């Protein structure tokens, strides 16, 4: 069974947010942290894993990512606060 992830990165608490999808969360977040991904996350220093959801179906994962990307910022902040009220970097718990 495969694992897929929808994740949200932040620059700081209540800072710039980025929503992504991957099949290897540890590798992908590491790429963001090491600035191996050029573009938005590199430009705005968005590399703190603050939210994640796990799925076993890629279509469902992509649909969820698209849904979250359409959300108002307030809603994204609410789901982060519900799962991770201290805005801890969850990457540390992955490695």
Image (cartoon, rainbow, N blue to C red):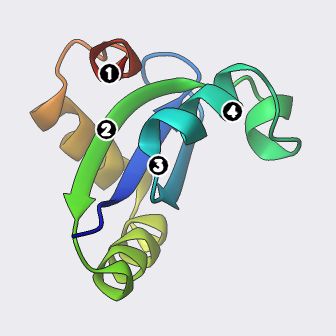
Q: CA distance from mark 1 to mark 2?
A: 7 Å
Between marks 4 and 3, how big is the CA–CA gap? Answer: 11 Å
Q: Which mark is residue 51?
A: 2
| Place of residue 78 in the rendered image (x, y in percent of width and height, measured from the top left) | 21, 42
Give the percent coordinates (x, y) of residue 41.
73, 37
**Above or below — where is 84 with respect to 12?**
below
Name the secondary structure under disc 2: strand
Q: From the image, tell me which residue sits under label 3.
A: 24
| Mark 3 touches mark 2? (CB < 8 Å) | no
Q: Are marks 1 and 2 in contact (CB under 8 Å)?
A: yes
- The local secondary structure at tag 4 comes to helix
User: For the residues marked 1 and 3, what is the alpha-carbon distance in whole angstroms?
Assistant: 14 Å
Instruction: Name the residue nearer the viewer: 76 or 83.
Output: 83
Lower position in the chain sequence, tag 4 or tag 3: 3
Circle 1/circle 3 CB separation < 8 Å: no
Which marked residue is nearer to the observer: mark 1 or mark 2? 1
């Amino acid at each position: 069974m495969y694992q897929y992830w929808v994740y949200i990165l932040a620059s700081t608490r209540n800072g710039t947010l980025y929503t992504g999808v991957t099949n290897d969360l540890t590798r992908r977040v590491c790429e963001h942290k090491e600035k191996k991904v050029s573009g938005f996350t590199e430009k705005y220093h968005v590399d703190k894993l603050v939210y994640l959801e796990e799925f076993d179906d890629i279509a469902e994962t992509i649909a969820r990512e698209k849904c979250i990307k359409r959300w108002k910022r307030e809603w994204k902040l609410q789901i982060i606060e519900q799962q991770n009220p201290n805005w801890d970097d969850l990457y540390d718990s992955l490695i």
